[in-house]
Image: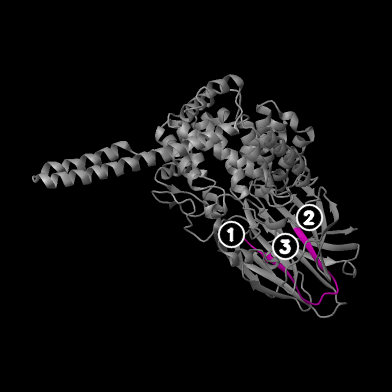
């Protein structure tokens, strides 16, 4: 609405000039001009005010056509049919007093902890200094907010800007301290965003289906946190509800099956539908969202419980996206839309981080996963322990102070191709996690056979990670090469996904794993891992097939110094305190040990150098046989003296393999029969 006071001042200033005119004719001419000016100003004022009023009225009328209120409320609002603004006020009164719809935010708001990060993000947002992709610095997006702002080349920044995570911080701070400046600013920014970002070609940066789904979930919580503020006016309600309707209608047209995107799309649509049953199409949205989630939990999750993209961060996200909609449905008495098998599968998904995370709770960062911080999943395990009455989850949540520790130390997720071998459930345990699975899509990497090794509180041989998504294509490409993972390559080329499990045999003193990946058209990599006495590993790599060229096995260590011994074909990390790792491949004719370029990324957009190396044998004809036998031994003080000798002369790819081990004078024979 135009500012009447502003225009009144202008008119007063114009007319006041007549006092200074002495000549009568000049006064008449001046008065005529000023009268004409006043008429023009009043016409502009009337037209401007009328246009805005008409615009507001049309938005209110559009909203009223989209909702179906309870009969008693509908009657009250229709009394003001000729006055849309009064209708909007009555509608706001209805929503401020509505109690039938339940939302988790109302159960947790007062319990939520406001972190220093929340406080900074919230206070920055008051000044239009926003967080996009949080790996980058916050950015001032202008007094007149530019929601398409791109301070860095990485598209992730602008995409995540339009998820408005800083709004969540504003809501948390507002709920905690009750300062209305946060509510006032949020309301203004909400109206600003809805006005500037219609869903069209020019605003695709804001309307990818993933951002739309995330907003559908987040905004319903923001609504419940801000609705009682005096700054939540009828204008805010109309803008908010019309946008929510547009979000849900758009999500009805988007369905990315077999992807985590599909879950966020369905979740956003479900939260809008359940929170605003007054929308005429809410039942349609809810039915479709439930259908998709029930469908996707069977499509996206392998029978072993792992989400098909095979990256831990996305797996944990999928648990949230599946479970939060069920939780909301349960709060509102409609959980029977999900069968018992739905919760059973979520419980199995919750077992995956227990089975595959390293002893300090960090992730083996295969694909687009990040190691994270020690103990990062404790709150999740505590929540899951209550939800599923699981004592092993409680044990992990409390670091062993409560609950019962898991009854196994070796796990095979056979459909996912992920395997974990550990010495115990102590934080200092030795643990190796290996990947040899199917193609997980865009968040997976051609890394079958790779592994991460942890011991003594240190990730001694971490996976490379993924570094970045869209801001540095060449940087991302480097991290997605097979040769920068701990596996075998032919001529340094990337492998395809063709996994096969040949043997899984955990035991008290020996855990045995044998997998294959037919990574090349004419060459298959067989990797056998022996975890001996829960102390060290013997890894046997065989190149089976007619492929010709350089056959390499690659290894990478944690950032730090390393000691290379070319004569003994050994490499060891060189941390001055704590645990190290010793890697040595058995000598044979033609074997080469060479340093390689090594990088690891533990945080988005950040990478650091690390020791990396390869053992190479040249395969010069299609009948030549290639086998590497490697000792990988974590140690705290002294390097263990381990000698390995193959028994007999077994053919490469044979179903029987045996070798003698001499560990500091203690001898044994181990092997397998497939």
Q: Tell me which colouring the rendered structure shows.
A: one colour
Q: Which residue is mark 1?
A: 468
Residue at position x 53%, y 26% in the image: 95
Which badge, 2 or 3, comes first in the chain's sequence? 3
- Indicate the secondary structure of the residue bearing disc 2: strand
Residue 358 appears in the rendering: no
Q: Quadrant of residue 330?
A: top right
Whether residue 651 is visible, yes or no, is yes
The residue wearing badge 3 is 446
N-terminal-most mark, 2 or 1: 1
Which residue appears farthest toward the top when viewing the image?
72
Quarter placement of the C terminus: bottom right
Q: How far from the left and from the top, in percent, is residue 257? A: 73, 48
Residue 128 part of the magenta-drawn span: no
- On residue 532, the disc is 2
**Residue drawn at the location 77% of the way across and 70% of the way down:** 586
Estimate how packed mark 3 is, as few (under 14), some (14 to 19) or many (20 or more) residues with alpha carbons within 10 Å. Answer: many
Q: Earlier in the sequence, mark 1 or mark 3?
A: 3
* Quadrant showing the N terminus: top left
Give the tally of numbered discs. Answer: 3
Q: Quadrant for residue 120, please give it.
A: top left
> Residue at coordinates 53% horizontally, 34% vertically from top-left?
61
User: Does 55 sit left or right of 104 as displayed?
Assistant: left
């Amino acid at each position: 609405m135009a500012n009447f006071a502003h225009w009144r001042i202008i008119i007063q200033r114009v007319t006041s000039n007549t006092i200074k005119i002495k000549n009568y004719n000049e006064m008449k001419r001046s008065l005529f001009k000023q009268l004409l000016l006043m008429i023009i100003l009043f016409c502009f004022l009337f037209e401007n005010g009328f246009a805005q009023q008409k615009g507001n009225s049309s938005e209110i009328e559009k909203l009223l056509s989209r909702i179906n209120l309870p009969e008693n409320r509908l009657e009250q609002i229709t009394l003001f049919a000729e006055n849309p603004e009064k209708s909007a006020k009555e509608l706001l009164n209805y929503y401020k007093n509505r109690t039938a719809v339940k939302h988790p935010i109302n159960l947790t708001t007062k319990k939520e902890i406001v972190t220093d990060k929340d406080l900074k993000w919230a206070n920055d947002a008051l000044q239009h200094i926003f967080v996009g992709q949080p790996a980058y610095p916050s950015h001032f997006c202008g007094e007149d907010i530019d929601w398409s702002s791109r301070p860095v080349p990485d598209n992730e920044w602008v995409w995540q800007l339009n998820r408005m995570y800083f709004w969540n911080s504003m809501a948390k701070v507002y709920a905690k301290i009750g300062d209305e400046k946060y509510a006032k600013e949020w309301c203004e920014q909400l109206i600003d965003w809805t006005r500037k970002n219609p869903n069209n070609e020019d605003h695709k940066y804001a309307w990818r289906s993933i951002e739309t789904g995330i907003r559908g979930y987040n905004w319903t919580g923001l609504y419940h946190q801000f609705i009682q503020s005096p700054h939540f006016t009828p204008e805010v309600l109309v803008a908010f509800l019309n946008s929510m309707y547009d979000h849900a209608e758009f999500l009805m047209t988007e369905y990315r099956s077999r992807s985590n995107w599909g879950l966020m799309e369905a979740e956003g649509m479900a939260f809008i539908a359940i929170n605003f049953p007054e929308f005429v199409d809410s039942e349609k949205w809810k039915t479709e969202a439930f259908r998709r989630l029930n469908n996707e939990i069977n499509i996206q999750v392998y029978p072993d419980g792992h989400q098909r993209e095979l990256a831990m961060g996305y797996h944990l996200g999928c648990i949230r996206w599946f479970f939060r909609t069920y939780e909301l449905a349960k709060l509102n008495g409609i959980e029977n839309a999900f069968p018992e098998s739905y919760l059973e599968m979520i419980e199995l998904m919750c077992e995956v981080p227990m089975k595959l995370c390293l002893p300090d709770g960090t992730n083996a960062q295969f694909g687009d996963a990040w190691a994270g911080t020690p103990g990062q999943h404790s709150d999740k395990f505590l929540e899951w322990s209550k939800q599923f009455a699981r004592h092993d989850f409680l044990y992990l949540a409390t670091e062993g102070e409560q609950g019962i520790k898991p009854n196994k130390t070796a796990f095979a997720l056979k459909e996912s191709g992920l395997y974990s071998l550990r010495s115990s459930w102590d934080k200092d345990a030795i643990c190796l996690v290996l990947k040899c699975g199917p193609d997980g899509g865009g968040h997976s990497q051609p890394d079958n056979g790779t592994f991460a090794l942890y011991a003594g509180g240190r990730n001694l041989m971490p996976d490379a990670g993924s570094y970045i998504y869209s801001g540095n294509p060449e940087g991302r490409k480097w991290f997605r090469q097979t040769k920068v993972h701990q596996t075998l390559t032919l001529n340094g080329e990337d492998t395809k996904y063709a996994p096969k499990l040949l043997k899984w045999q955990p035991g008290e003193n020996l855990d045995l794993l044998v997998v294959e990946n037919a990574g090349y058209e004419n060459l298959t990599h067989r990797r056998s891992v022996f975890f001996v006495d829960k102390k060290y590993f013997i890894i046997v790599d065989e190149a089976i097939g007619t492929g010709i060229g350089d056959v390499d096995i690659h290894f990478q260590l944690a950032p730090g110094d390393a000691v290379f011994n070319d004569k003994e074909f050994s490499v060891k990390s060189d941390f001055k305190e704590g645990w190290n790792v010793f890697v040595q491949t058995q000598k044979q004719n033609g074997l080469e040990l060479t340093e390689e370029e090594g990088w690891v990324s533990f945080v988005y957009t950040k990478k650091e150098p690390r020791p990396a190396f390869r053992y190479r044998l040249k395969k010069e004809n299609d009948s030549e046989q290639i086998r590497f036998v490697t000792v990988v031994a974590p140690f705290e003080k002294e390097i263990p003296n381990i000698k390995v000798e193959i028994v007999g002369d077994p053919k490469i790819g044979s179903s029987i393999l045996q070798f003698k081990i001499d560990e500091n004078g203690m001898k044994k024979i181990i092997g397998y029969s497939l």
